[in-house]
Amino acid sequence: MTFQSTFLAACRRQPVAHTPIWVMRQAGRYLPEYRELRSKVDFEALTRTPELAAEVTLQPLRRFELDAAILFSDIMTPLQGMGVDLTFEPGPVVRDPIRTDAQIDALPQLIPERDVPFVLESIRLIRPQLPRGAPLIGFAGGPFTLLCYLVSGRPSKEFGVARSFLYSQPRSAERLLDHLGDAMAAYLAAQAAAGAQALMLFESWAGLLAPAQFSRFALRAVRRTMSALRQRTDVPLIYYVNQGSALMGTLSDLDVDVIGVDWRSPLGEVSKVLGPGKAVQGNLDPAALFAPPEELKHHADEVLRQGRAAPGHIFNLGHGIWPETPPEAIARLVDHVHERTANP
Ligand code: CP3
């Protein structure tokens, strides 16, 4: 009998032996073994050295019975491959923020095999080492989220510079987004060809946009990426929209398998708006991992209860895990989700 991944089955809205769980940012600073490695090697070197990127990707799966791995890299890595000069401090800082058409025109196409070969090599190294048949998720940043960093030049709460760019230079913004949308399609298709078994687009800053701006700018570019990917691969596609409660209605006809949801809206309500064609991924508040153990179970049960309203549910946090989180909380969460949802 071939092993059926619960994660891939849930993405495809098929029956599962238990609700699958993985954790956004599951490889990272809350793990002592990551901090240990990171004390010797800087973040970029970790992402650029396939053996180390593979090691860090696998660390959380050795500790916890997670149902999927996610490639250790960053949303800005392919932009460096396109020649964008940036550093991680630890958030991305772009040396020459992009504000003009000349800069947009000067951005080259991304050719993943040439520009980021180490990412593809990491995937090839990870695949045969994955425990328990867990699949590997490849990822990229949503075009609008990448625009936020490229135009603002650094992390920001409101990304006012990037958001005003949409109004002051809408045509330039569309051109930049088209370019990024095409580049991320090439990047993700190459990840799938190298062995990634699902692909996720992180739209971390979508919630800054009003629905009309979201549709015109962010979603238009995502449609471009996703429809290109549908032509080139049949792995499940996931679109994570942070702070996207007001935007869910515009996503029901986006051609993806799964919508990732932050913790602010209950999954049952979200699923009603998305309709029967989408599985959901989420959405425990990362802060809930600081609750006493019995309370944490209660919060997880509520997420599971809400998730049952959707045609497929992948348990996750609503956003990335915080570096201060005790690893034992993740161990308890993973075991609880599996025990609570196991079918005899
Ligand atoms: O385990 C995983 O999820 C894979 C690794 C991963 C990283 N970044 C590693 C990282 C993933 C999926 C990302 C995506 C990412 N990067 C996003 C989208 C997801 C989200 O959280 O909204 C965004 C917005 C970025 C941009 C970015 N990179 C920021 C804001 C920061 C600094 C803040 C932070 O969380 O550390 C980074 C650096 C970064 N990316 C680190 C890690 C582990 C920290 C580097 C270090 O070890 O010092």
Image (cartoon, rainbow, N blue to C red):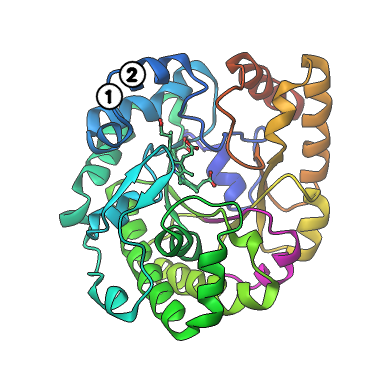
SS under mark 2: helix
* Residues packed near mark 1 inside 10 Å, few (<14), some (14 to 19) or many (20 plus): few
Q: Are marks 1 and 2 in contact (CB under 8 Å)?
A: yes
**Is ligand 1 less than 8 Å from the beta carbon at label 1?**
no
Q: Does 36 appear above or below 314?
A: above
**Between residues 187 and 292, which one lies in front from this camera angle?**
292
Residue 123 belongs to magenta span: no
Q: Which residue is drawn at the image coordinates 33% and 59% (left, top)?
A: 189
Closer to us: 152 or 183 = 152
From this view, report whether residue 234 is shown above or below residue 27: below
- The residue at the point 60 percent across, 52 percent down is 157
Mark 1 to mark 2: distance in Å?
6 Å
Q: Of the residues shown, which amino acid type is indicated by label 2? A: Leu
- The residue closer to the viewer here, 317 or 303, is 317
Range shown magenta: 238-255
User: Residue 277 placed where, x, y %?
Assistant: 67, 64
Name which residue lies at 65% across and 37% down: 317
On screen, 177 above or below 88? Answer: below
Is 89 placed above or below 246 here? above
Q: Which residue is mark 1?
A: 41
For the C terminus, which image quadrant? Answer: top right
280 on left or right of 47: right
Assign a secondary structure to mark 1.
loop
Q: Position of residue 188 (x, y in %)?
A: 36, 57
Look at mark 2 in the image and give the residue it sits on. 37
The amino acid marked with disc number 1 is: Val
Left or right: 281, with 143 as reference point: right
Relative placement, left or right, of 271 versus 92 is right
Query: Residue 81: x percent and y percent?
Result: 24, 55
